[in-house]
Image: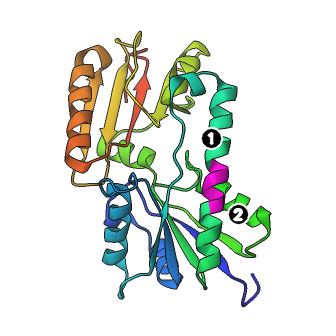
């Protein structure tokens, strides 16, 4: 990469534990002139705990107070009447990405030097930041090169916390979202990691085994595992505890059909 070219660094910072930030990520943080942070708090409302968590993470790893540019995150349509079909959902997400790109572009125009974006987990797993920043670059108003720094993902931490392997010997692992779990099961997937859950909907999988975790790597971490039909109520209660204590909940789980006596 040529000297003098402005850089935008997308830095994977893990699921929440500052100790799980890689040395490469710390180096990238220390080379950034400022950080763009999407703030999801309603205007005039309560602070966004996720934005606050990013500031605490920076304070942990930087020697000097960082320059933080909070950008009001555009509202995203979540009503079931607007997101029921795949096409409708894709259109809503595309509109949200475009609005985010415009907001990020303005932050880059208003500030000089290399910029950092802190991305939960790993930027390559179910996160929009790479796509949004690519849109900013494509608009052509802010020339820059983009660096992506990988991070520990919640999928990896889920497996570590439960001391398990994510797949049976020689068997595949399918990763999907909560809204598409049913589709994966109907397609014959029997070992599924599920992310981005508005709720835990595992109807029909009561005899499967589940390994679940919420707010992994934070002081508000919750873990539950067992036969789905036996532990579903515990998971829902733990999910609410995480939300109430942290102000937010991000959970991930693995469900596996109980077959051949193999659960781990």
**Residue at the image point whose x is 52% and y is 17% from the top:** 182
Q: Quadrant of residue 147?
A: bottom right
Q: Is residue 184 left or right of residue 16?
A: right
Q: Which residue is mark 1?
A: 93
Q: Which residues are magenta?
A: 97-102
Numbered label tally: 2
Question: 198 or 194, which lies in front?
Answer: 198
Residue 68 in sight here = yes
Q: Is residue 8 above or below residue 239?
A: below
Local secondary structure at mark 2: helix
Question: 104 or 35, which lies in front?
Answer: 104
**Residue at the image point whose x is 33% and y is 42% from the top:** 249
Q: Categorize mark 1 by other alpha carbons within 10 Å: few (<14), some (14-19), many (20+).
A: some
Q: Quadrant of residue 52?
A: bottom left
**Residue at the image point whose x is 71% and y is 74% from the top:** 145
Is residue 31 found inside the magenta-colored segment of the image? no
Q: Position of residue 55 (x, y in %)?
A: 35, 70
Q: Is residue 107 left or right of residue 14?
A: right
Q: Position of residue 35 (x, y in %)?
A: 49, 74
Disc 1 to disc 2: CB gap under 8 Å: no
Q: Categorize mark 2 by other alpha carbons within 10 Å: few (<14), some (14-19), many (20+).
A: many
Q: Is residue 218 left or right of residue 262?
A: left
Local secondary structure at mark 1: helix
Question: 81 or 199, which lies in front?
Answer: 81
**Quarter of the figure that contains the C terminus:** top left
Residue 168 in sight here = no
**Residue at the image point whose x is 60% and y is 65% from the top:** 104
Question: 157 or 8, which lies in front?
Answer: 8
Q: Which residue is mark 2?
A: 136
Q: Position of residue 150 (x, y in %)?
A: 54, 62
């Amino acid at each position: 990469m040529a000297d003098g070219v402005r850089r935008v660094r997308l830095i994977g910072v893990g699921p929440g534990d500052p100790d799980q930030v890689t040395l490469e990520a710390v180096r990238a943080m220390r080379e950034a002139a400022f950080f763009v942070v999407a703030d999801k708090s309603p205007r005039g409302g309560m602070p966004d705990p996720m934005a606050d968590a990013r500031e605490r993470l920076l304070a942990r790893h930087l020697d000097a107070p960082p320059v933080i540019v909070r950008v009001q995150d555009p509202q995203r349509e979540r009503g079931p009447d607007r997101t029921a079909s795949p096409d409708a959902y894709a259109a809503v997400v595309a509109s949200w990405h475009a609005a985010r790109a415009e907001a990020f572009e303005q932050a880059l125009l208003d500030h000089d030097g290399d910029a950092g974006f802190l991305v939960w987990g790993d930027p390559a797993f179910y996160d929009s930041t790479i796509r949004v920043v690519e849109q900013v670059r494509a608009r052509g108003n802010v020339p820059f090169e983009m660096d992506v720094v990988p991070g520990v993902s919640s999928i990896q931490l889920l497996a570590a916390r439960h001391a398990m392997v994510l797949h049976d010997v020689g068997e595949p692992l399918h990763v999907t979202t909560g809204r598409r779990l049913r589709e994966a099961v109907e397609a014959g997937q029997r070992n599924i990691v599920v992310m981005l859950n508005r709720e835990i909907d595992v109807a029909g999988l009561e005899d499967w085994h589940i390994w679940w975790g919420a707010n992994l790597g934070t002081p508000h971490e919750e873990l539950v595992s067992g036969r789905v039909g036996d532990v579903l109520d515990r998971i829902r209660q733990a999910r609410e505890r995480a939300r109430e204590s942290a102000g937010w909940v991000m959970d991930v789980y693995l469900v596996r059909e109980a077959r051949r006596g193999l659960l781990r």
